[in-house]
Structures are given as structure tokens and as C-alpha cells.
Amino acid sequence: MSVDETTIFDDFLLKSGLKSASEEAIYKPLTGGVSSDIYRVELPGRLICVKRALAKLKVSADWQAPVSRNVYEWNWISFVAEHFPSAVPKPLAHDAPSGVFAMEFLPSDDYPLWKTNLLHGSVDRKAAAVIGQRIGQIHSVSARTPGLPEKFDSGSNFYALRLEPYLVAAAAKHPFVGDRLAELVERTAATKLALVHGDVSPKNILLGRNGPVFLDAECAWFGDPAFDLAFCLNHLLLKKIVAGKAASELASSFAALTAAYMDQVDWEDRDALEARAASLLPALFLARVDGKSPVEYITEECQREAVRKAAIPLIASPPQKLADVAQAWFP
């Protein structure tokens, strides 16, 4: 941790009243993300977490993103904390000019990471269902909340963090489906129905005693809720690569998450939302091997080729049902 970083965080903690001038803060970096610096902060008798957005993300590609996303993440956490307090770490303080906020620290012994479980082949259908239900509940409440479209008018951030590095980047490598991917980008950017997290990934979901806890909402945007559903389901597809022995459990979890989510859809026609999610899903599947942020656990070219073989035909001829995507990958 650099001296400049320490100064930024120390000043923030003092200004927000989370630390006194006489107290020493001990910072421990937390791993797992590419877009922010995040630290566990040990203070006398207590632990908290601080986070600061980075202008250049920690990936091999040149991926720049506006640090203003920190404000939208804070606003997303605050909104969810108001309606579903157990679904996020408790928000503590925020300073927009420095791009820093503080939140409750949740220990891994009590809040295991969903990604870790999945990679080890520990696949819990009930956990997937509860996650799908909660995502749908957040979307439902947000769709009926006045003022959110203006508060989360962050389409440029969402494009920089999601549409360009995933779908646009994949289109550049696969011109055969380039037009179709461009259509998905245009449609997704134009659909504004609910508050989207934008990174509903197992690496950002803790399994708490009172249900899932969602982290890392830097991509928050009032947009297309189908994106969150497809983004999350995509990771259940991808995990088959490394947890193949749990393929049937992954397929069952895929179905359970989908059903639990769809039960919450009361803001639009369910078939319409599912059709958008079903067309987005294979595009996101392809993007995680050929976009700017490939998943780190797919390391062999034969694995990447298997994803392409499944994804590209579904992009070219989009399915209407999510089960059709699952069937193509979990036959």
C-alpha cells in the first residue's frame, strides 16, 4: 500500500468520524476484484472495509473506466440496505470527491464466497434459488421506486464497464456474429426498467445465514434487469469447465435460480424479459473467453473452443427460453 493511498484512506476515515486522530489504522488488501482497491481496516476493537475505484482496471487489456462509478455503487448499496438490509454490507460513510466509501466488514468464516463453493464442486440448488429470488425482489422494488432513473443515469459507465469490454470486444473477434452482438448492445443500452447491479457474479455473492449478500455494484445502472439474470446464470454455465463432476447440480441450480427469479417479475411481461435474458446469455458466455475480462479459471484453448462452439450458434439464432441455453450446454 503506497503512502498516498494510506493518506487518502486515513483522511477519509478521520473526516467521516470512523477513526479518531489517536487511533492507528492497519490496512490489509482484499483480493478478487480488478476495478478497485479494497482493504480490510483494523481499528481498535473493530473491523471495517474501505474501497476506492481505479481509473484503469487490473487486467491485461487497456480497460479504462470512470471513477464516478463509486458514487453509483454507494447509492446501490444504500438503496438495497433500505429495503433488504441483510442483502448488503452495512454502508458506513462515503466521500464522492475522493471516490472512497466504507462499509461493514463481513468475515469469510461466517460469509463464505459462493464462487469458492462452486469451484470446489459444492453446488447448492437452494442457495441458487434464494439468490435468484433476491435479485428479482430488488428489481421489483426498484421498478416501482420514483427517482431511480435519474439517480442511476449511469449508462456511460455501464457501457464502459460492461457493454464495450464484453459484447463489443467479443464482436471484434467474431465478425460472423458481430451484427447480432451490436444489436444486443443497442437493445440493452436502450432498455430502462429497473435498477441493475451489473456484476451479479459468484465472486460478488456471500452466502450469509440470512441469505445472500451482494458486493461490488460499481456497474449499477437503471436499465435492463435481464442483464443481471443472464450475467449470473452465465457463471453457472462457466463453472462446468472446472467442476464438470457437478454438471447435473449446476444445471439444477440454473433452473432453480431462473424459476425463483421469474416468480418475482411483476414489472413487465415475463416472457419478454426471459427472451432478452436468453439472447444475452450466450453473448456473455462468449465474452468471458473472448472479451476483455476472460475468466481466470478457463486456461486451455480447448476449453475456450468448447464455449465458442456452444455460444456462437445461439447468438446467431437467439433462443426465447433460458432452458434452451442450458440444454445446449448441459445436455
Image (cartoon, rainbow, N blue to C red):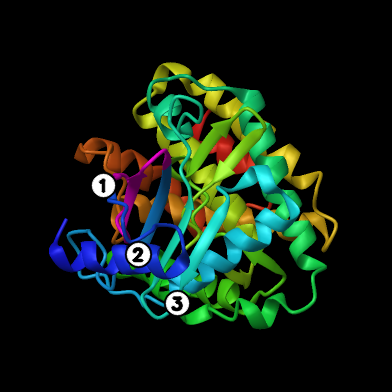
Q: CA distance from mark 1 to mark 2?
A: 16 Å
N-terminal label among 3 and 2: 2
Front residue (pair 197, 215): 215
Residue annotated with mark 3 = 96
Q: Is residue 276 visible?
A: no
CB atoms at circles 3 and 2 under 8 Å apart? no
Residue type beneath disc 3: Ala
Classify mark 1: residues with Cα within 10 Å, few (<14), some (14-19) or many (20+): few
Residue at screen point 48% across, 22% down: 247
Residue annotated with mark 2 = 52
Q: Quarter holding the N terminus?
A: bottom left
Q: Which secondary structure, mark 2?
A: strand
Residue type beneath disc 1: Ile
What range is drawn magenta here? 28-46
* Left or right, 155 with reference to 9: right
N-terminal label among 1 and 2: 1
* Left or right, 270 with reference to 5: right
Residue 331 sits above or below residue 56 on the image: above
Residue annotated with mark 1 = 26
Classify mark 2: residues with Cα within 10 Å, few (<14), some (14-19) or many (20+): many
Q: Position of residue 95 (x, y in %)?
A: 45, 73
Q: Which secondary structure, mark 1?
A: strand
Residue type beneath disc 2: Arg
Residue 133 sits above or below residue 1 on the image: above
Classify mark 3: residues with Cα within 10 Å, few (<14), some (14-19) or many (20+): few
In the image, residue 31 lies in the stretch drawn in magenta: yes
In the image, residue 250 lies in the stretch drawn in magenta: no
Asked which quadrant contains residue 297, the reply is top left
Q: Position of residue 219 (x, y in %)?
A: 48, 65
Asked which quadrant contains residue 98, the reply is bottom left
